[in-house]
Image (tube, rainbow, N blue to C red):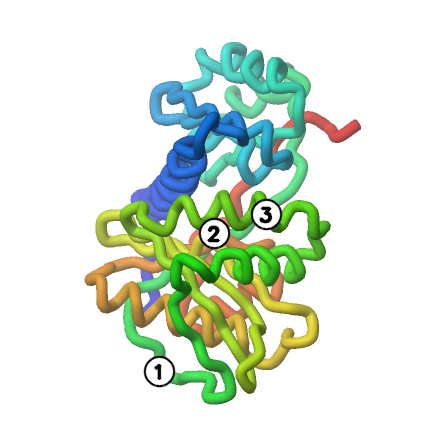
Amino acid sequence: MTLPITQQLAERVERAEMNTLLSRLKGIQKREGNPMRVQMHRFGEAMLFLTPGIPGGGFNKLMGLRNEAMPYLDMILAEFDDANMPYRIDVVPGMLQTESFQTLSKRGLHHLSFHGALVGACKKPVHTTEDVEVRQLARDDFQLYAELYGMSFSMPAFLYEAIAENNVILYDEPGWSFYLATMDGAPAGIASMHVHDDVATLAAAGTLPDYRGRGVHKALLHARMEQAVSQGCELLVGQATFASASQRNMQRCGMQLAYTKAVWGPIPS
C-alpha cells in the first residue's frame, strides 16, 4: 500500500529515528562510567546528541531542527565546538524557512549531502528468501554480532569489543530486537530493530561481503517486518544512503521514499 507523503508523516518518520537514537544512547550511557561519554540535550523540538567515544556524524548530530529552535543555534554550536569532533545537522524537508538556511550559512555551515528516509505500512512480507535462515539473537551472541557488524562495514577488529558492549546493553531495553542471518549454517549478516509506540525502526543491518547480492538483507528485512506486525506496529521506517542497494531492497519490500534529508555541517578539514 502506497502512503500519501505529508508533512505530518515526514515528522512521524523523523520522530521514530530520533526515538531510536535516544533509546540507543540512553542504553549506552548506562554502561558503568559512561565510557562513550554520551550527552543529550534538548532545545525546543530539537535534540542534540554527543558521543565523543563513538566518532562520526551518526552519533554526534542535531536532529529535529525547526525554525523555532534557531534562537538556540549558537548554544548548540558551542556544544559541538567544545566536543571538538565531526558532527552533522539533519534537516528534514519543510522544517526550515529560507532565513534559517541563511543563518546556518552565516555560522560557517554547509549543505554536505543527502540521506534517504523510507516508510511503509506494516504488513507481513509476501515473499521469503528460502536459502537464508534468520533467528533472533540471544544475549551470548553479541560478540558474533559485533564481528559480523564490523566485517560488514570494514571496521578494524579492535572496535569489535566496543560494538558488542554498546549493543548487548540494549538487549533488555524496551523495544529492541537483534537478528542473525545464516546461509548453509554459516553466519552471513546481522540486523536490529527498535519499536516505539506503533512504529518499528530498522535500526541497523549488515551483510558480509561474500554474501552480498544473495538475499541476506532481504531476509533480514522480512524477519523484522514479521516481528513488527506481531507487535502491532502500524508503520515501518528506515534510513539508507540515497539510491543505495539498501534503499532498493527496502523499496522491493514495499517501503517508499518518505524524503531525503539534507545533511549540514562544517566543511571537513
Above or below, comparing residue 127 to residue 71 in the picture: below
Type of residue at label 3? Glu
Location of residue 149 in the rendering, given as x and y in whole percent from the top left corner: 59, 58
Q: Earlier in the sequence, mark 3 or mark 1?
A: 1
In the displayed structure image, the side of residue 31 where residue 157 appears, left or right: right
Location of residue 107 in the rendering, given as x and y in whole percent from the top left corner: 63, 15
The N terminus, quarter of image:
bottom left
Looking at this view, is 95 or 28 the one in front? 28
Task: Tell me the crowding category of disc 1: few under 14, some 14 to 19, or many 20 or more residues within 10 angstroms, Cα based.
Answer: few
Q: What is the distance, in whole Å, between disc 2 and disc 1 at their CAs?
A: 23 Å
Mark 2 residue element: strand
The C terminus, quarter of image:
top right
Q: Which residue is mark 3?
A: 161
Task: Tell me the crowding category of disc 3: few under 14, some 14 to 19, or many 20 or more residues within 10 angstroms, Cα based.
Answer: few
Location of residue 213 in the rendering, given as x and y in whole percent from the top left corner: 63, 77
Q: Check the image and name the residue furthest to the right.
A: 269
Residue 31 visible in the snapshot? yes
In the displayed structure image, the side of residue 133 where residue 173 appears, left or right: left
* Residue 117: assigned label: 2
In which quarter of the view is residue 52 placed?
Answer: top right
Residue at image point 53% right, 52% down? 116
Residue at image point 28% right, 71% down? 123
Residue 243 visible in the snapshot? no
* Residue 126: assigned label: 1
Q: From the image, state whether disc 3 or disc 1 is nearer to you.
A: 3
